[in-house]
Amino acid sequence: MDTKLTPEIILEKEFKKGVRGYQIDEVDQFLDDVIQDYNTFMQTIETLKVENRRLKGELEEAPKRQAAPTTTGTTNFDILKRLSNLEKHVFGSKLYE
């Protein structure tokens, strides 16, 4: 999706002059407006590319950050279950009376 034009190409574009051609000043003013818009589009695209790379990086890091709490949660559950079993073994049925 490469563009054919750059702001420089638009700025340097020369039109042939005819007997009943366009007003040069009007064409120049229009091209100036096109250049400004083109620059704005190019800056917006570059900004979006940078943001896209940043978000892709965050997305790649997300599974790494989520893995730790899941493991910790499972480990905590296992520890609580083992403690409960140990209490039952040590104290027997007295604990639940």
Image: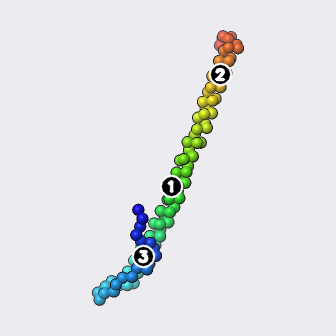
Residue at image coords 40%, 69%: 4
Tag 3's secondary structure?
Answer: helix
Q: Position of residue 73 (x, y in %)?
A: 61, 32
| Quadrant of the frame with the N terminus | bottom left
* Left or right side of 19 for 63: right
Residue at image coords 68%, 17%: 87
Residue at image coords 58%, 38%: 67
Q: Position of residue 11 (x, y in %)?
A: 44, 78
Res. 81 image quadrant: top right
* Left or right side of 64 for 37: left
Q: Residue 81, relative to residue 62: is it above or below? A: above
- Residue labelled with disc 2: 82
Tell me the CA gap for discs 2 and 3: 75 Å
Q: Amino acid at mark 3?
A: Ile
Could you say which disc has been placed on residue 52 in the image?
A: 1
- Residue labelled with disc 3: 10
| Quadrant of the frame with the C terminus | top right
* Sequence order check, earlier mark of 2 and 1: 1
